[in-house]
Every structure is written in structure tokens, then in C-alpha cells.
């Protein structure tokens, strides 16, 4: 099995970006943990990050036929991008939405997620741990659905 972990804008800055909100774990560390978690559960994990909406959409399109599911933190595009939601709906791959912070405890504009409408579920508020939780959940879902 193969899983794509897709990170959106500003998440390349994790570690130094508002550590009081997002923690001190870098994206590189998150990627390493995701790959290890996948490996321990028999899945290959490929990690990608972009600050550009179109690049993220292309990555979602390319995931079809290449990966079995997607873990996505779309950053601020979560709250704005119907195009990303449409891309995820188009490829019909199971998708789990992740946020480091608890978006429901923050500003009103962060409480709307277009991604949630096409995701199996959302994990938020657990910091970097959310990514490995999502990988476990996605692999369990793939096993359950054959
Ligand atoms: C985020 C939450 C978003 O509201 C924000 O724009 C981000 C990060 C999170 O992981 O908590 O860039 O997706």
C-alpha cells in the first residue's frame, strides 16, 4: 500500500513558525515519522509539500493510480479552496484531513473546512502526532475496505 502525505502553504516553516501554535517539530521530522509509521504498518509513505494551490492540485491528480489514500494538511487553503476540495473529490481516493492546531478553538474563519466535505474524517489539535494518527487510521480503513 502507498500513501501520499500532502502539506500545503507555510507548513515548510514548521519548527520556527508560531511555535506556540504549531509546536517545534519540523516538517522534515514529521515526514520522517510518517515514513516510519507507514513502514511499521506495511505501507509506503511519500511526502510532498507546496505553497502553491495548483501544484497541490496536480499532486492530488497524480496520486490517482499511484497511491491508495491521502493524508492532507492544506494549511490556509483548507478554508478557502474549493478547487482543492474538487480535486480530492475527483480522484476518489480516501483522504484524511490533518491540522496541527485545533482549528475549532481558533478564529471563526478557521472553523470552515472545504476539505472536510470530501474527507473520511479530520484529526486536529494533536500537533505533529496527528499525522501518524492519520496514517494509522487510513491504513486501518484501507484494510477494512479491502
Ligand atoms: C493549519 C491550520 C490552518 O488554519 C492554518 O492556516 C495553517 C495550519 C494547522 O495545521 O493547524 O496553515 O492547517
Image: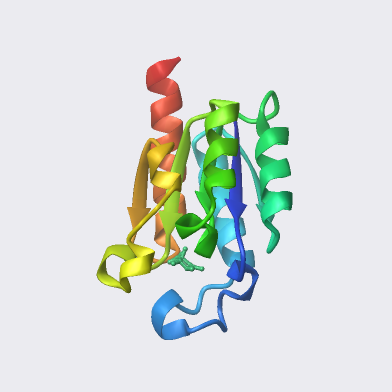
Residue visible at 48% across and 37% down in the picture: 95
Residue visible at 57% across and 40% down in the picture: 39
Q: As rendered, which of 25 and 122 lies closer to the eye?
A: 122
Task: Name the image colouring.
Answer: rainbow
Q: Position of residue 77 (x, y in %)?
A: 54, 59
Q: Position of residue 71 (x, y in %)?
A: 51, 45
Residue visible at 35% across and 52% down in the picture: 123
Q: As rendered, which of 122 and 132 lies closer to the eye?
A: 122
Q: Measured along the vertical axis of the image, is residue 92 above or below residue 105?
A: above
Residue visible at 45% across and 46% down in the picture: 115
The answer to whether 96 appears left or right of 48 in the picture is: left
The answer to whether 51 appears left or right of 125 in the picture is: right
Q: Measured along the vertical axis of the image, is residue 1 above or below residue 33?
A: above
The total number of labels drawn is: 0
Single out the residue that lies furthest toward the top: 146
- The answer to whether residue 126 is visible is no
- The answer to whether residue 21 is visible is yes
Placement of the N terminus among the 4 image quadrants? top right
Q: Position of residue 142 (x, y in %)?
A: 45, 25
Q: Position of residue 128 (x, y in %)?
A: 45, 64
**The image quarter in which residue 17 lies:** bottom right
**The image quarter in which residue 118 lies:** top left
Placement of the C terminus among the 4 image quadrants? top left
Q: As rendered, which of 14 and 60 lies closer to the eye?
A: 60
Single out the residue that lies furthest toward the left: 105
Q: Measured along the vertical axis of the image, is residue 5 above or below residue 125?
A: above
The answer to whether 65 appears left or right of 100 in the picture is: right
Amino acid at each position: 500500500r502507498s500513501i501520499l502525505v500532502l502539506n500545503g502553504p507555510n507548513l515548510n516553516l514548521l519548527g520556527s513558525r508560531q511555535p506556540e501554535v504549531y509546536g517545534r517539530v519540523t516538517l522534515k521530522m514529521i515526514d520522517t515519522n510518517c515514513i516510519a509509521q507507514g513502514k511499521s504498518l506495511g505501507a509506503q509513505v511519500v511526502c510532498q509539500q507546496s505553497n502553491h494551490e495548483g501544484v497541490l492540485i496536480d499532486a492530488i491528480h497524480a496520486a490517482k493510480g499511484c497511491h491508495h489514500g491521502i493524508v492532507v494538511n492544506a494549511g490556509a487553503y483548507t478554508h478557502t479552496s474549493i478547487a482543492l476540495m474538487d480535486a480530492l473529490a475527483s480522484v476518489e481516493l480516501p483522504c484524511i484531513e490533518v491540522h496541527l492546531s485545533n482549528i475549532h478553538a481558533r478564529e471563526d474563519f478557521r472553523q470552515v473546512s472545504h476539505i472536510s466535505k470530501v474527507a473520511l474524517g479530520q484529526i486536529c489539535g494533536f500537533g505533529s502526532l496527528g499525522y501518524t494518527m492519520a496514517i494509522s487510521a487510513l491504513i486501518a480503513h484501507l484494510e477494512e475496505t479491502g
